[in-house]
Image: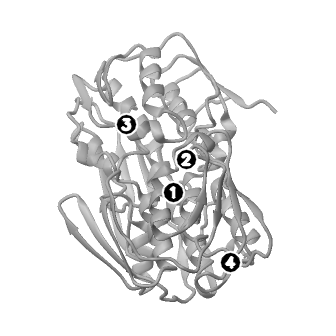
Amino acid sequence: MANHIFINEKIIDFKKKISVASDKSISIRSILLASQAIGVSKISNLLESEDVLNTLRAIKKLGINYKKKSGNYFIEGFGLNSFSSRKRITINAGNSGTLARLILGLLVKSKCQIKLIGDKSLSKRDFSRVIKPLRLFGVNIQSKKNSLPIKILGTDYLRPICYNERIGSAQVKSCIIFCALNTPGITQINAKKSRDHTEQLLRSLNYPIKIKTKNSFDKISIKGLGQFKSFNHIIPGDISSAAFFIVLVVLSNKSEMIIQNVNINESRIGIIKILNRMGATIKFRNKKIYRGENTADIFIKSSKKLRGINCPSYLNSSAIDEFLIIFLVAAKAKGISTFKNLGELNKKESPRLDIALRFLKMIGIKVKRNKDNIKIFGNPKLEVTKNIYIRRYLKDHRVFMMACIAALSFGGNWKIEDKDSVNTSFPFFLNILKSLGAKIN
């Protein structure tokens, strides 16, 4: 079956109410924490993407049983350090950096050596950021080039650490937190602000974790070896998946949309803050709090006068997965948009900053780059009339989805490869686009 699509027409204006894929970050964390709880946890509206299914396969290999019934997942845990493996096994994280980095924190007492592998894209990513703190805990972890494959052999002699996490990586922070759960004493993390889904979920389970915020850092204290009971969790929609439709509406002429029940955790809504500063109309309705997480319906309507932005760097971590799509808005905005300190984009599934510059130039936008800083010279009259071919690159789902939104917003004749990449995070992405009236072949 062909793994590419053709888009030859812009989308016609629409007014729709939709739901997007469930939150991937929360789905993976819920599974991993359910595997360490005591009793049977029930997870509803779990994202059934490749990354999440690989997480389920991983805990199954480690002796944790689960079943699906009436659309819900039931996971039976036996408490901390209850993974049971009497022989060496290999866990394949596929394309998921979240799974790969987080599960290492739960394997720190494994009795047998466990090998962690991933696909071509994941195998190129930097794991030194989690290998270093795990070794400080006393974990025996081996990797030739600070990348996959990684071999880990647990120890009963873990020691608590104090660690400064300066990257702003929720994956690093969560890996350390998971290791701290299995470590006697109190582990402290001074972490640059990033997604806090792990902390919020643990707090909702009444686990002894304390968080104090000062400036742009969280001081986190975790008391190890505290057990927690099974739980029920309903996963909300993913803001990163909603982002593509938000931008599609913003770039349209006369469209409106409501995206229902989306997670609007403060550490994830950088895209909303950035786009509103650029003149977009995006509002939250029906706000609720569930297990420490803020959720809401998101209302968006077309924006007639978009303006460039000098984007504050403090918003980077809360929009890190959305910058590709934010750049499309900058391309259509009046004036120059400046984005700084975006080196972390090149540490994702693909070198996204490099790809973004090539992509913008391809559609006729002037771009200047100075190291990890870029300037985008917007064109409010941007129209693409030529043939554009987006080749497959490291199975990056966000590159594929960005290209789809660009084609539907700016016009042109597009051939976009690697449509199966969306299975890692948003399997029904193309179906929603078609339901809005997009003509995709």
Q: CA distance from mark 2 to mark 3?
A: 18 Å
* Amino acid type, residue under disc 3 in the picture: Gly
According to the image, what is the colour scheme of the structure? one colour
**Residue annotated with mark 1:** 131
Of tags 2 and 3, the one toward the viewer is: 2
Classify mark 1: residues with Cα within 10 Å, few (<14), some (14-19) or many (20+). many
Secondary structure beneath label 4: loop
Which is nearer the N-term, disc 1 or disc 4?
4
On the image, the x and y values in percent for residue 395 come to: 63, 37
* Amino acid type, residue under disc 2 in the picture: Asn
Residue 83 circle label: 4
Of residues 192 and 38, the one nearer the viewer is 192
Q: CA distance from mark 4 to mark 2?
A: 25 Å
Q: CA distance from mark 2 to mark 1?
A: 7 Å
**Residue annotated with mark 2:** 146
Secondary structure beneath label 2: loop
- Total marks in image: 4
Residue at the (46%, 84%) spot, across then down: 184
Residue at the (52%, 56%) spot, across then down: 19
- Location of the C terminus by quadrant is top right
- In the displayed structure, does residue 75 sit left or right of residue 138? right
Q: CA distance from mark 3 to mark 1?
A: 20 Å
